Structures are given as C-alpha cells and as structure tokens.
Amino acid sequence: MLSPSKRWRKEQPLHSLTSCVRRVLCSRRHSLWILLVLVLVCIAFQTFVARQARNDKGNEVPQLHFTVNKPQSFSLDSILGNFWSNSAETVSPGLSSSLHSEKEADSHLQNEDFATTPNRFSTKRSYKSTVSKFRHFSSSKFLPSSSIPGKCKEKTHIVFLKTHKTASSTILNILYRFGESRNLTFALPLNKNSQLFYPFYFAPHFVEGVTSHRISEFHIMCNHMRFRKSEVAKVMPRDTFYFSILRNPVSMMESIFIYYKSIPAFHGKRTLDDFFNSSKTHYNASLVNNHYAHNILAFDFGLNNSATFDSPDLEKQVSDAIFAIERDFGLVLISEYFEESMVLLRRSLCWSLEDVASFKLNSRSDRTRRKLSPETADKIKKWNALDWRIYLHFNATFWQKLDTVIGRQQLEEEVSELRALQAELAGVCLKDGGAVEPSKIKDAGLKPFQYGAAVIQGYNLNADMDNRTREMCERLILPELQYTERVFVRQFPEKAPWHKQALNTGQAWPRAKRRFTHLKMPQSALSQHNKPTAP
Ligand SMILES: Nc1ncnc2c1ncn2[C@@H]1O[C@H](COP(=O)(O)OS(=O)(=O)O)[C@@H](OP(=O)(O)O)[C@H]1O
C-alpha cells in the first residue's frame, strides 16, 4: 500500500514545471537536500549580519566630518589647558590635566575665568550636515539617538540631583531636551513649582501626578531637591540611574555669595571676607536659607552640613558622606570639566554626543564676579571643609573613571567633537555667537531669572532661521524656569486650561513665555516652623 504522498506523486504526470517542483518537494531525499540548502542560506545570512554589527561597533561614536578650520589642534593638554584660560596661547604646557590634589585644584581656581562658552569657537556656518543631524536627534519626532549600536541600551530612567551653582541648569536643559524628544515623563514639582520643595527633604508627594496616580511611570527627575534616596526610590523605577555634579567649593561659594545675597548670613556683608570676619560669632545655622552659606553640597545630598575644618569628627563625617554618595550615585560629575563630564555622562547613559551638546546657561556676567585672594579661598575651604573634601575625593574618582571607561585618547577626541558641534550650533543659533547681558536680550521669554546681586546672562537667536531650526535653537537656550513650565504644560495640559486650548492651536509657548510669576528662589516664604530639621 502506497502512502498518500507517494500515491499522489505517482498519479501526477511530469509535464509541467509546477508538477516537477511538487515532486521534488514530496520526495523525502529531496526534502533533506532542500533543508540543507536552507540551513546553509541561514548560516550565510547570520555571518553577514554579524559582520555588519561588528562594523557598526567600530563606529560607535558617530563620525562627524568637519570642514571648518578648528580653533587649534586638539591635544589633551591643549583642551584641558584651554579650560584654565580664555586664550589658547596662554596654555601652560606642563599643566596637569586633572585636579588630583588640593594644590592643583587651587591652581585651577587662580584661572577660574575659563571659558566654555560657545563664542570661543568659530561661528562660521559650515557644519551644516552635523547640525541637521543634531536637529534630527533633538526634534520632537521621537527619533532614536545615535547611541552606541550593539553595545548598550539608551538609559531613560534617570535621577539628576541638581546641586546649586554647579552648571546644573545646563544639565537640566540637556535632560529636558532629551526627554521631550522621546516623549518621556518627568517627575516635576507639584503645582508648577520650579523646585521639589527644596530645602525640605524630598518626599514623593512633592511630585505632580504621584498622589493623583495620574502618571504610571516617571522617567526623569531633575529639579532642585534635598536628596533622600529612600523617598526618591518610591517614585522612580528600580533601574534608575542616579547622577549629580560638584563644583570647586571656592568658586561655588563666590557664585552663591553674589546670587543669594539676601539670605540672613550674607545680609549686609559687602564681601566674603566681611562674612568670614563675623561668621564665627554671627552665623546662625537655624535661620531659613542660611544653609546656602555652609557646605551646600553636603546639604543638597541630604547630609549633615555643619562641619568645619576644626570639627572633632570631621574625618568621620567626610568618610560617611563619601560612602553615602558612592552608594547612591552611579556617577558624580565635575563642573570645571564640563565637556569631559558630558562625555562620561553620555557613555554612562548610552546616549549620543549630540544628546549632551549644550550652551552654557545661567552664567553670571563678569561685572558680578569677584576675584578672590588666596587667603579668602583658604577661608572658604576651611569653612566648607566637608564640601572641600567631598570635592577632592570625587574629582579624583572622576578622572579614574574617565581613564577606565574611555581613556585619554578617546576622551580627547570626543571632547573636541563635542566642542566643535557646540561651536557649530552657536554659529547657527546665536546672534553674536555667545551670551549677552540680560538687558540686551530681545525676547523677554528667553530672559533668565535674575536674582540677588548677580547679573545672569542669556542669548539672542539669529533671525534668519526656518521654523524647525528656530525651535531647536530656542530649546537650547531656554532658561530653567521657562523650560520647566513648558514641560509641565505638555505633561499636564489639564492643569493649565488656557494652555490646553492653545496647545491645540500651536500657540501655547508664546503665551507661556509671558507669564513668569513664580520664582526660582530660596523659599523665603517658608516659615521658621517649617524649616527642615538637621539630619
Ligand atoms: N557648561 C558649563 N561649564 C561650566 N560652568 C557652567 C556651565 N554652565 C553653567 N555654568 C556655571 O554654573 C553656574 C550656574 O549653576 P547652576 O545652573 O547650577 O545654578 S542654579 O543653582 O541652578 O541657580 C554659573 O556659575 P557663575 O557664573 O560662577 O555663577 C555658570 O556660569
């Protein structure tokens, strides 16, 4: 008895191509051959795909081909040397590329006037291809970034502890642009505040949408807060990446002294020396907002900020603080090495270099900077002994990490690529190529918030841009308060009925720009009773 398939084969005449194929298919021996051929095809295909992937990995950093004459040839020494001075010519060849020691950190301070502003670069519009690439990545079309293919997955669950006067507004802008372009959800301060009820310890109900369960998953938390890991972890997903940034406490305190002029500790003090001459007798830690004047880094990290150089338990406080920060944060960046920090950040997050390109935001005009004598710098370090030691420690580990993760050669290349990209963007976006005094900012909606005795600079946009380029440029220079409101309105349109209607007609932002009433300020409205207790 023949099997049905054999019978069928036998019954079919062999006169057409189709019947021939049928016969081949039905013969067991031929089926084996076909299977073999298919396996071979599969292996060949796999090999091809693997080779392609290997090629892609080799190009993990998008290769940007620039045609413009670079400001100078970029060696690591020159890059880092430039960091110390405004002019490339004054770079000292022997300058160490990192601040491993107290002495080196000091030498950096002498040259604090480093410039990372875009106007250091050529403003010729000749990087067109890169800019269009940048625009593509930064557009609101939720396009994927050119992250490192095959190696890692772009991180989108992020907490950034926004410390004070550390270039944190520039990083905030980077995070806002990244999140917006991918439609991510931000853990924003309740009721359109600009801060997560700083200086109180963070609590989940400070976040809009938490109590109402309006948001099921938060991606990014990045507004000022006083950090408390256990509470933040209640809001953010388990795989969240935590990072923050530190600045040399000496230049940081100089900046804070000018900006937070009205806090009780600084009130009536003409200079920081005046403050130090009276601080021993007059500094009152229990007065609202006086924490800005003392170990503010430790305070922001949620730690006890009361130590000075002569505290008997300083060493223990230092090691406890370092332990806590290392336990809770995957990465600690250094403001003085902003571009290097961005290279390390983008590696840690598996983002593209375009994702971390920025303009320097929230910078003071030179009119409101004060040069400090070495004696004053020394007083600051002693007064803020805890911050100073934290800074020294994380500056050292920052460079160790760079060496391990990237290596100096690759770092040098990425830093110069990033600078070139930023220079190109400045050429395309910025009128005059760089920051201007607030009085010279034409569009009131792009003016940064002014506070204390500081004069905070902003930018004017070039006039001749198409809409898409203008939108990209506007987001790069949008100050913190304006951007926070913009993100809030997009995320909670129902909280701003006038916005809801306007969003539909594309008119929301111009209207939002005109109404900035809430302040990014030390919350002087807080009563004494509400003052957070010392940890
Ligand atoms: N890219 C980059 N590189 C280096 N330094 C930078 C950068 N962006 C901002 N800044 C400087 O950071 C200071 C403002 O810090 P913040 O934005 O954290 O201030 S705030 O606490 O949010 O008000 C402010 O310092 P001062 O100018 O000394 O006040 C800015 O000039």
Image: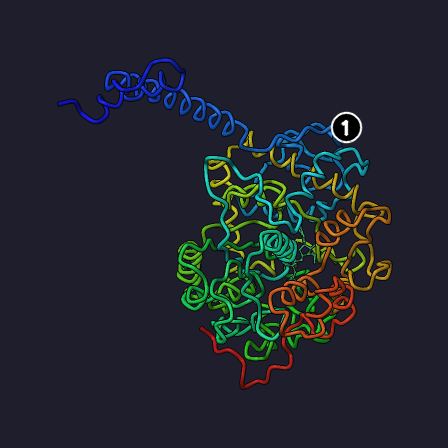
- Residue 182 at x, y percent in the picture: 58, 52
Helix, strand or loop under label 1: loop
User: Mark 1 packing: few (<14 Cα in 10 Å), some, or many (20+)?
Assistant: few
- Whether residue 431 is visible here, answered yes or no, is yes
Q: Quadrant of residue 276?
A: bottom right
Q: Can residue 104 be seen here?
A: no
Position of residue 177 measured from the top left corner of the image (x, y, whole percent)? 64, 53
Quadrant the C terminus occupies: bottom left
Quadrant for the N terminus, please.
top left
Q: Residue at x 62, y 51 (%)?
A: 181
Residue under the image location 54 percent in, 83 percent down: 530
Q: Quadrant of ligand 1?
A: bottom right
Q: Is residue 1 left or right of residue 182?
A: left
Which of the 4 image quarters holds residue 43? top left
The x, y position of residue 312, in whole percent, is: 42, 66
Position of 39 with respect to 198 (left or right) is left
Q: Quadrant of residue 83?
A: top right
- Identify which residue is drawn at 77% across, 38% down: 121
The residue located at (54%, 56%) in the rendering is 388
Q: On screen, 504 above or below 418?
A: below
**Residue 202 image offset from top left, x and y in percent:** 49, 70
Q: Is residue 45 above or below residue 81?
A: above
Position of residue 139 relative to residue 291, above or below, is above
Q: Which residue is mark 1?
A: 69
Disc tally is 1
**For this view, does 462 lie left or right of residue 422?**
right
In this rendered view, identify the residue nearer to me: 520 or 164: 520
